[in-house]
Image: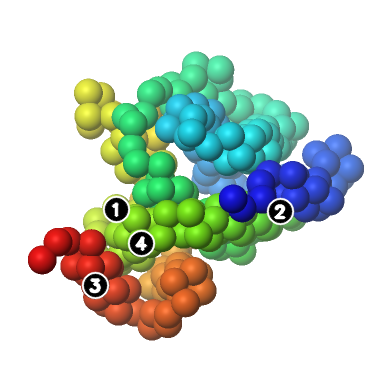
Amino acid sequence: MTAMLYPELFKQLEAVRWHMDTDVPWDRFDANLLSDEQAQTVKMNAITEWAALPATEMFLRDNRHDSDFSAFMSIWFFEEQKHSLVLMEYLRRFRPDLAPTEQELHDVRFEFDPAPALETLMMHFCGEIRLNHWYRRAAEWHTEPVIQHIYTTLSQDEARHGGCYLKYMRRAIANFGNEAKSAFTKVGVLMASARRTAQALHPTNLHVNKNLFPRDTIQSRLPDPQWLERWLDGQIKFDAVWEGKVVDRILHNLSLLMDRSFGSVQELNRFRKELTASATPA
């Protein structure tokens, strides 16, 4: 039986926790460097981050068998909701006309269909990697120094969350072997193939409740459902170079997990097929 991860992860994340009052340079705000277009994207990201609420409800429901991971959700949920809060605080201070309403926040809270826990874990691991890169790019696109600082801070949090998920993935492989490897490689092939899809592959942009289709993604329930693609393509310009960085990080981490080098999505897919074949009786 492996040791619980939650106690150590709590200590690690507590040691680097930032505080909204003292660690955000609010006094450096420059109104001349914030456009309406930029401020609107802050609102959309604040609402999107609020979706940690239904995601946490999903995680707790689908991981009733795993109290260690469920306890870790207390940290993840707290830090993700703080992301929403700091973006809303920015708007409250500097663009109160754009602060999300309680109803706009509540609109992204809906039930997700049950899904296999291992696949969901991998999907959110990839989501943290992707969001880390999205926020790094957002910090470069923005021109106002306070929101640049906030996006850089959030990107670092997302990278740490990805590292925590990776530890739970490593534990899953130790406990479940090829079952976990198959789940992780299956989702890894999907999430590393974003350049071949019409939509951004992130948990907030995937369909999660067939009874609510097509309004069963977080993005579809925002005040501006087309915002994400416009933000990525036309504003922060998350191009093929940046997408390549996301794919490289997914492949690098899966290489470490599987103790096998994956230089491309095709190589990862071949390994996935090997795992499937080995699990199928002759």
Q: Which mark is residue 117?
A: none
> Of callouts 4 and 2, which one flags the residue occurring earlier in the amino acid sequence?
2
Residue drawn at 42 percent across, 54 percent down:
176
Q: Is residue 84 left or right of residue 277?
A: right
Circles 4 and 1, Cβ within 8 Å, touching? The answer is no
> Of callouts 1 and 2, which one flags the residue occurring earlier in the amino acid sequence?
2
Check disc 4 and report the residue beneath it.
178
Check disc 1 and report the residue beneath it.
199
> Of callouts 2 and 3, which one flags the residue occurring earlier in the amino acid sequence?
2
195, 251: nearer the viewer:
251
Above or below residue 35? Residue 43 is: above
The quarter of the image holding the C terminus is bottom left
Give the quarter of the image for residue 262: bottom left
> Of callouts 4 and 3, which one flags the residue occurring earlier in the amino acid sequence?
4
Asked if one can make out residue 207 in the rendered structure from this viewpoint, the answer is yes
Circles 2 and 3, Cβ within 8 Å, touching? The answer is no
Mark 3 crowd level (few <14, some 14–19, many ≥20, 10 Å Cα): few
Give the quarter of the image for residue 276: bottom left
Residue drawn at 33 percent across, 37 percent down:
115
Query: Which x, y percent locates residue 23?
Result: 85, 47
Check disc 2 and report the residue beneath it.
153
User: Disc 3 marks which amino acid?
Assistant: Glu
Q: What is the distance, in whole Å, between disc 4 and disc 1 at their CAs?
A: 30 Å
Mark 4 crowd level (few <14, some 14–19, many ≥20, 10 Å Cα): some
Q: Is residue 188 left or right of residue 30?
A: left
Check disc 3 and report the residue beneath it.
274
Circles 1 and 2, Cβ within 8 Å, touching? The answer is no
